Image: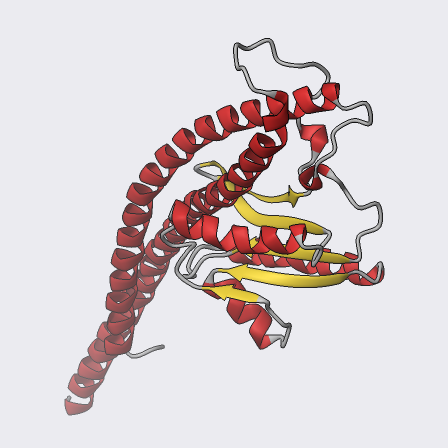
Amino acid sequence: MANLKEIKRKIGSVKNTAKTTNAMKLVSSAKLKRAEELAKRSKVYAAKLTELLNEIAARMQNVNVDGLDNVYFKPVANPTKVDIVFITADKGLCGGFNAQTIKRVNQLLEGFKADDVKVRLRAIGRKGIDYFKFNKIELNDAIIGLSAAPTYKEAAEFISDVAEGYVNGQTDKIILVHNGYVNMITQEVREDQVLPVDASKLDLSQVSTSELEIEPEDDDTLLDALVKRYVEYSMYYALIDSLAAEHSARMQAMDAATKNAKEMVKDLTVQYNKARQEAITTELIEIISGMESMK
């Protein structure tokens, strides 16, 4: 039977761990509420931006006989160069949150490799960066800090550089991968094609009947500006969505860890009581034996 002092030390250690994990759960819960509210507001803005982009694109498609003619909307049938932008957390202790994103990126890498497509990885978040560096996989970009505290300016600067490579013909497609927030107990890995803009996600069947008035010669300029803002905001929203999912995953992981710690304390307490009872019984037997030997 284990030493009583050793068991007591373990009980104290596990109780301290439970206090820490419970505190982390409460912190993540508070941060999740703020991130969730920000994500909801951002989603409303993104919807309006998409609606305006849809209107201008539909107008141009109806004006041009050959359909929509814009560099941001021209998909390549057989891409040879692809950029994958993926987001992970800077910190751990959030269950399989980071592993799910990394797994999806690896699946994409294998698929493109089989098709002989050159892939450039652009990583945001320490956990993903550390994983691919450890496995000696080259990263074209490695940014730490942005996933923990996303700002629109930094997100726009980052994705603008990537989009410029698409416009210049350095890449045929840009894919964004992140683990997104569904609800407080569910996260979902999301894979979005940033560029070229997926026209199937837009309703280009008819021109909007809104009161927006634009000169025909300004359509191209406006569409380019809207696409750039659309791409920038897609990056920013993905960062916010990922942050909310990270807090959600950490809250769940810390809740499970706290419950496991409490169960462990119960088991150790039972073990401690058994050891204590055994020690008392042994001591009584020794006393009785000694008294019997003196008769």
Residue 32 located left or right of residue 289: right
Q: Is residue 96 visible?
A: no
Residue 79 located left or right of residue 146: right
What kind of colouring is applied to the model shown? secondary structure
Residue 137 located left or right of residue 291: right
Residue 101 located left or right of residue 40: right
Q: Residue furthest bottom?
A: 294
Q: Is residue 35 visible?
A: yes
* Quadrant in which residue 117 is drawn: bottom right
* Quadrant in which residue 108 is drawn: bottom right
Q: Is residue 200 above or below residue 172?
A: above
For the N terminus, the quadrant is bottom left
Q: Nearer the viewer, residue 229 or 238?
A: 229
Residue 176 x, y percent position in the rendering: 60, 49
For the C terminus, the quadrant is bottom left
Residue 30 x, y percent position in the rendering: 28, 42
The residue positioned 70% from the left and 14% from the top of the image is: 206
The residue positioned 66% from the left and 38% from the top of the image is: 197
Q: Nearer the viewer, residue 144 or 286?
A: 144
Residue 68 x, y percent position in the rendering: 74, 29
The residue positioned 55% from the left and 49% from the top of the image is: 178
Total tally of numbered discs in the picture: 0
Q: Nearer the viewer, residue 274 or 263?
A: 263
